[in-house]
Amino acid sequence: MTVAKAWRQVRLLTATCDVAALLAAYVGGDFLRTRLWMNQPWPERLPGFGSPFQVHYWTLLVLPLAWVAVLHWHRWYEPGGHRLRWYLRRAVTASVVTGLVTAGLALFLQREAFPRMQVVAFTALLPATTLIARGISSLLAAWLASRQERHVLIVGLGREAVRLRRLLRASTLGRCNVLGHLAMPGEHHGPEQRTGAVLGGVERLAERLDTSVVDEVFFAVRIERLPEVLPYVRLCEEVGVAAHVLAESMVCHAAPEVVDLHGMPMLAYAPVRHSAELLFIKRVLDVILAAVGIVVSTPIMLLCAALIRFTSPGPILFRQRRSGLHGRAFTMYKFRTMHADADQRLGEVAHLNEADGPVFKSRVDPRVTRMGAWLRRYSLDELPQLFNVLLGDMSIVGPRPPLPEEVARYDRWQRRRLSMRPGLTCLWQVKGRHRVGFDEWMHLDLFYIDHWSLRLDFLIMCRTVPVVLSGTGL
C-alpha cells in the first residue's frame, strides 16, 4: 500500500469514527433531555425532535454530512501529529458550528416545540465524544499500520534523503521497511553512511525491482536532476511499483498525484490509480464473502478431503509457494489433485506443456489422479484458497498467483500484474484458461488492473458461476 492510499484509509477511518461520535452525542443529548431534564422514561421512541420518525430521518442524513464538512473545513483530516490543545480547540469550534446548524434546521423543520435543551446537551457532549473518537481512530489506525509493512527504496544520498528516511521510519501510516539507498551518478557513498545502507548506484534499480519485494520507490533528488530520474520513474511504472518524486513537477505517462508527506511535497506516479476507499470496500467484501464461502462450503470440503484420502495416498492439502502483491511470497492452499511424487516427475511430462510462456499447463497430465481431474473440472480443488483470502494473501477476484520461478522469467511489462492482489478468479479463468495464450492472459490481467472497479469484480464473479457449474473453465 502506497503512502497516498494509506493516508486515504486513515482519513476514511477517522471520518467514520467522527460520524459515530456525532450520533453518540445526539443520542446522549436526547437521553439527558428526556431522562434527566424531563424525568421521563427513555427511550419510548427513537431519538429525534418531536415525532418519533419524521425528523429523526433528516438527522441521520443531514447532520453526518454537515459534521464531516465542518471538520474538514477546520483541517481536521490533514496529516501531521498535533497536541491535544489543537484538537480540543477545533473540536469545540466545530461542535458549536454544528450545534447552530442543528438548531437552525430544527427551527426550520419544526416550528412549534423546539427542543432547546437537547441541542444544548448535544453541543456540549459533541467535543468530548469527538476527542474520544479521535483517540479510538488513532489506535485503530496504529493497529492497522502495524499489520501493513511497506518495503521502500530511496534514490539519493543528500539531506532530503536523510530527512525522508527519518519521516518514513516514524510514519504512522504503516510499518516502513527502508531497504536502503541507491546513489545518483556523482554522489559519493561508502558501504554505510548516515543515510543507512547504500545498495549501489541507481543503475541497479531494475535489478532490485526484479529480485526484491518493493512497494514504492522514493526519489529524493535536486530539481536539476529530474531529467536523469525520468527513465527510472518510467521503469517503476513499467513493473507496477509506485514512484514518488520530491519535486515540483514532472512529465510522465502515469498520472501524477500530489501527496503531502508530513510537510514534504511529493508527486506520486502510481500506474495503478485506485481509490483507497474502494480498495478498502473490496477487502471488506473479500472477508465477508470468504467467511460465508467457508461456512457454506465446509460440507463440500469435508467430502473432497475424504475422497482424496481414500482414493490416493498422500496429504489432502497441497501447499505451494506463490508470488502475491508486488512479489510477496505466500503459501497457497489447494486440495491435492496429483500423485504425491508429482514434483519429481515434472521432467517426464515437460513435453506435454500446452502453454506458450514461462508456465506449465496441460490437460493430459498423467500425474493428475482420477479424483483430481474431477476436482479440477469443477474448480473444487481451489476451495481452500478461501482461507488465503481470509488471511489477506489473496482476493476473490484478481490475477491468478504465479510461481516465483515463473515471475523470474517474466518480461518487465508482465511484472505489472503483481501490482494487484492475486485472486481466486479473473478474466483469464472465465475466458477458458487453456484456450487463452500466455500473452493474451497477461494482457487480460493488465486490462483488469487498468479498468478495475467493484462493478467489474461483480461481473467476473457472475461469469465465474456458470463456468464452474458447467465445468468449462479448463
Image: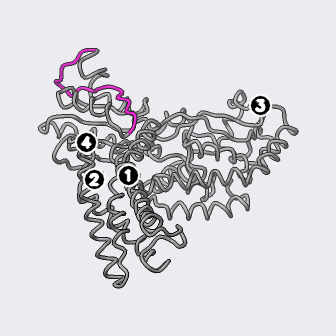
Q: Is residue 386 left or right of residue 310?
A: left
- Residue at (17% x, 48% y) in the render: 249
Q: What span is colored magenta in the figure?
A: 174-191
Q: Residue 162: x, y in percent?
A: 22, 27
Looking at the rendered structure, the kind of residue marked 3 is Ala
Residue 66, picture quadrant:
bottom left
| Badge 2 vs badge 3, beta-carbon distance below 8 Å | no
| Badge 2 vs badge 1, beta-carbon distance below 8 Å | yes
As drawn, the residue found furthest toward the right would be 310
Foreground: 114 or 180? 114
Give the CA distance from mark 2 to mark 3.
Answer: 59 Å
Q: Which mark is residue 163?
A: none
- Residue at (43% x, 79% y) in the render: 50
| Badge 2 vs badge 4, beta-carbon distance below 8 Å | no
- Tell me which numbered mark, 4 or 1, is placed earlier along the sequence: 1
Give the CA distance from mark 2 to mark 1.
Answer: 9 Å
Looking at the rendered structure, the kind of residue marked 2 is Trp
Give the CA distance from mark 4 to mark 3.
Answer: 59 Å
**Mark 3: few, some, or many residues within 10 Å (few <14, many ≥20)?**
some
| Badge 1 vs badge 3, beta-carbon distance below 8 Å | no
- The residue singled out by tag 2 in the image is 76
Between disc 4 and disc 3, the foreground one is 4
| Badge 4 vs badge 3, beta-carbon distance below 8 Å | no
Q: Is residue 117 above or below residue 138?
A: below
- The residue singled out by tag 4 in the image is 82
Looking at the rendered structure, the kind of residue marked 1 is Thr
- Tell me which numbered mark, 2 or 3, is placed earlier along the sequence: 2
- Tell me which numbered mark, 4 or 3, is placed earlier along the sequence: 4
As for residue 398 lying within the magenta part, the answer is no
Q: Which mark is residue 14?
A: 1
Foreground: 131 or 33? 33
Give the CA distance from mark 2 to mark 4.
Answer: 10 Å
